[in-house]
């Protein structure tokens, strides 16, 4: 099955960052084409259900964020 997503493209120095706006997955590349191709792979991996052979260990992660 194919699905279309929206990508935001940002140029940061020598890198191009592509972020999927619908699910928040991002990737990068040296060109827009590279970044979009890498983003497509990242989205496919993100949406692939895990096939665990053992139960995962769950742990909390505390992150300090800046107040806006």
Image: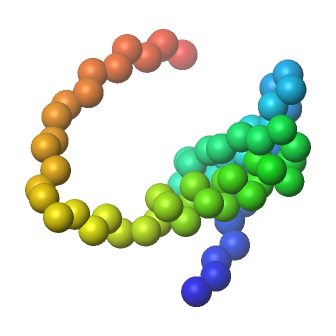
Residue 35, position as x, y percentages in the image: 77, 48
Is residue 8 something one can see in this rendering?
A: no
Q: Nearer the viewer, residue 56 or 68?
A: 56
Q: Quadrant of residue 64?
A: top left
Residue 28, position as x, y percentages in the image: 71, 40
In the figure, 13 relative to 60: above or below? above
In the figure, 19 relative to 40: above or below? above
Tell me: 53 left or right of 19.
left
Residue 43, position as x, y percentages in the image: 57, 60
Q: Residue furthest front?
A: 53
Which residue: 34% across, 20% down?
A: 63
In the figure, 11 relative to 36: above or below? above
Which residue: 80% across, 50% down?
A: 34
Which residue: 56% across, 48% down?
A: 24
Is residue 23 something one can see in this rendering?
A: yes
Quadrant position of the C terminus in the picture = top right
Q: Residue furthest bottom?
A: 1
Q: How many marks?
A: 0
Which residue: 57% across, 49% down?
A: 25
Colour convention: rainbow
Residue 21, position as x, y percentages in the image: 64, 52
Tell me: 17 left or right of 20.
right
Q: Quadrant of residue 15?
A: top right
Quadrant position of the N terminus in the picture = bottom right
């Amino acid at each position: 099955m194919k699905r279309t997503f929206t990508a935001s493209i940002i140029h940061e120095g020598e890198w191009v960052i592509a972020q999927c706006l619908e699910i928040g997955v991002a990737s990068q590349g040296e060109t827009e084409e590279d970044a979009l191709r890498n983003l497509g792979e990242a989205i496919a991996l993100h949406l692939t259900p895990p096939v665990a052979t053992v139960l995962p260990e769950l742990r909390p992660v505390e992150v300090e964020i800046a107040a806006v």
